[in-house]
Amino acid sequence: MQRMIAVAGATSALALAAMLAPSPVLAQSAQGDVSLTIYNADLALVQDTRELTLPVGTARQEFPDVSAAIRPETVTLSGSGAGVVEQNFDYDLLSPDKLLDKAVGQTVTVVRTNPATGAETREQAQVLANNGGTIVRIGDRIEVLESYGARILFPGLPPNLRARPTLSVTLQSSRAGPRPVTLSYLSGGMGWKADYVALFDEAQGRMDLQGWITLNNTTGTSFPNARVLLVAGQPVQGGNGYDNGMRRPMPRGGVRMTPGTESANRERLGDYYVYPIAARTTVANAQQKQVSFLDVNGAPANKGYTFRNGWLGASDEAQSVATVLNLSTSRAGGLGDALPAGTVRVYMRDARGQPQFIGENTIDHTPMGSSLSIRTGEAFDVKVQPTVEKRERITGDEWEKTSRYRITVNGKTDDVTVETKPTFWRTTMHYKVTNARPTPVKVEVVQVGLENWWQDTRVPSESVKGAQRTADERVWLVDVPANGETVLTVQFDTRY
């Protein structure tokens, strides 16, 4: 009897899966001894060692169950006495639409069931097209098959349609017999990040921090019983690895990091850190897996308030300050580790002792010994209202050489230097900081936009002594009494 393949309706994936699906992929995988090196940037190195029996001479060998997101140009194959002549990646995978596409021009059997009697009728049909719907010729009529009430029987599978991603390799072998052969390739569709859970105790100035590696596999392929290494870093992919002198800082999303200079006790790969998963594990397709890598209790931490004001920023209404969690990754600071990029979620216990979520933010790769200020939300009771009191044009006190000219008078040419006094704009700013809490607070007020191109931006007066943190921003730490307010007044002299 001729083997038939049935599809219920023109595009029913469920019916195709029911008729054609093999046993679970994990139980039937053709993979051998698999090692995965997984990077942050949607990239993985797959190394798959399989036991093959090869004849002398040229032979075609298929490697099913490779990643569907394989980068074929990165494939290498190593084995004693064997070399690659040619390789092909067959990614035309079996699906209802693909099966119907391959059947265009061929004859199939259309089966219908009478819903009242349950009786089946079968008709031979020629598939004319499968573009947004399946069109067939049955006898002398043209019909568009509906998704319900009909199924299609196919005489067999097309030879070039694969149920699983398959790499076909033509090998040249100098000897016959079994041997291990290692297939290596890069693949997309796999990556990882860190997730952190911080339980902050404000009264004690301490926190517990647990770090989890969160691994995702969307390659279309499962990797059972694999050895897994996770690499924290960003390998260059494509291009020449240079940025033409232009820095492209990653957005910090409300996190300020002062990089540290301590070396973490972690395995390294070049300039990257390596986080091996101790035991073999199955990395299943369409799965998110978590593995613990950090567990610290009682590390020092404290809460802070910060307000960043844009250049000439003013507001008719007071604005809430940001609440930040301050911590250190130094050995003395309690964490003593490098932190791979990921999301930090912060919890605090309520009056009943139950942990409650108070905010989250994303950190970049953070060296050991760094200081982190992680924004977790906005304060309800602490606000700042910035005001531009006035701007006036003033002239500096010292002469400066600004330009040179070549002048010709009566046939005589001289170089003339013109000296002028610099012109500044003096801006007077008020920052009214209010505190409705029953305890005093310190608020970090940050004024940004002080691009110091000429190295002559000046602060002639300030009611609270500030510090120039960068060429672009100045910072003041303002003490605000309980249920009270403080007004910070500052003058800037700038060229714009």
Image (spheres, rainbow, N blue to C red):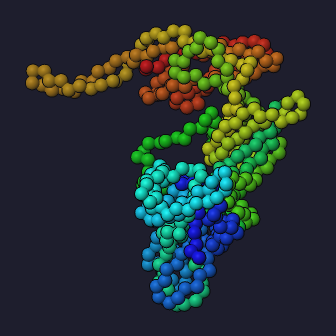
> Which quarter of the image is occupied by the C terminus?
top left
Q: Position of residue 195 (x, y in %)?
A: 70, 46
Q: Nearer the viewer, residue 470 or 22?
A: 22
Residue depicted at 56% across the width and 15% down the height: 314
Q: Position of residue 401 (x, y in %)?
A: 34, 24
Q: Is residue 329 visible to us here? A: yes
Image position of 141 with respect to 153: above or below: above
The location of residue 377, given as percent across then percent down, is 69, 29
Label count reads 0
Q: Residue at x 50, y 90 (%)?
A: 56
Quarter of the image for residue 151 reads bottom right
Q: Is residue 159 left or right of residue 377?
A: left
Pick the front one: 75 or 303: 75
Residue 264 seen in render: no
Q: Residue at 67% across / 23% down in the picture?
A: 321
In the displayed image of the protein, which residue is found farthest to the right? 352
Q: Between residue 375 and residue 450, name the one nearer to us.
A: 375
Q: Compared to 114, does 80 lie above or below?
A: below
Residue 128 location (% of width, % of height) = 42, 57
374 left or right, relative to 185: right
**Does 356 sit left or right of 273 as displayed?**
right
Q: Which residue is located at x 52 percent, y 41 percent?
A: 249
Q: Is residue 35 left or right of residue 297?
A: left
